[in-house]
Each structure stands twice: as C-alpha cells, then as structure tokens.
Amino acid sequence: MKKLILVALAAVAGLLVYRQIQADRAEQDLWTEATDAVPAGTGTR
C-alpha cells in the first residue's frame, strides 16, 4: 500500500512540475512576442 501511495505522489509531483514548465514557457513566449523588434516595412501607414 505504501508503494502505491508513493507512486501516486510521484505522479502528482511530476504533473505539477510539467504544468509549471508549460506555464513558464507560455510566459516566456508572451514576453518574447511583446518585446521583439518590428521588422522594417511591416508597420502601418
């Protein structure tokens, strides 16, 4: 029974780490998009 609980806890911990990494990537992508320089000729007239 203890092994099952440990496996379940490890799975939950892995899921939480995975979700945090995904959130960090999404935030980094957002910052990259917001701070990228606009290439010449693509602005509005």
Image: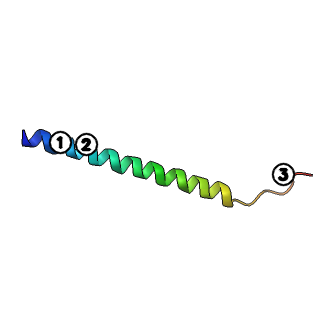
Q: Residue at x 79, y 56 (%)?
A: 39
Which residue is identified by label 2? 11
Q: Residue at x 61, y 58 (%)?
A: 31
Classify 10 Å Cα crowding around label 1: few (below 14), some (14-19), many (20 and above).
Answer: few
Q: Give the label on residue 18, or none.
A: none
Give the distance between the C-alpha atoms of the residues marked 2 and 3, in whole angstroms. 47 Å
C-beta proximity under 8 Å, tags 2 and 1: yes
Asked if residue 13 is positioned above or below residue 32 in the image, the reply reads: above
Amino acid type of disc 3?
A: Thr
Q: Residue furthest left?
A: 1
Give the image quarter of residue 12. top left
Q: Give the label on residue 42, or none.
A: 3
- SS state under label 1: helix
- SS state under label 2: helix
Give the image quarter of residue 9. top left
* Mark 3 or 1: the one toward you: 1
Amino acid type of disc 1?
A: Val
In the rendered view, does 8 fall on the left or right side of 29? left
In the rendered view, does 4 fall on the left or right side of 42? left
Q: Earlier in the sequence, mark 3 or mark 1?
A: 1
Q: Where residue 4 sits: x, y (%)?
A: 12, 38
* Mark 2 or 3: the one toward you: 2
Which residue is identified by label 1? 7
Given residues 40 and 2, the one toward you in this image is: 2
- Quarter holding the N terminus? top left
Q: Residue at x 67, y 61 (%)?
A: 35
Q: Residue at x 74, y 61 (%)?
A: 37
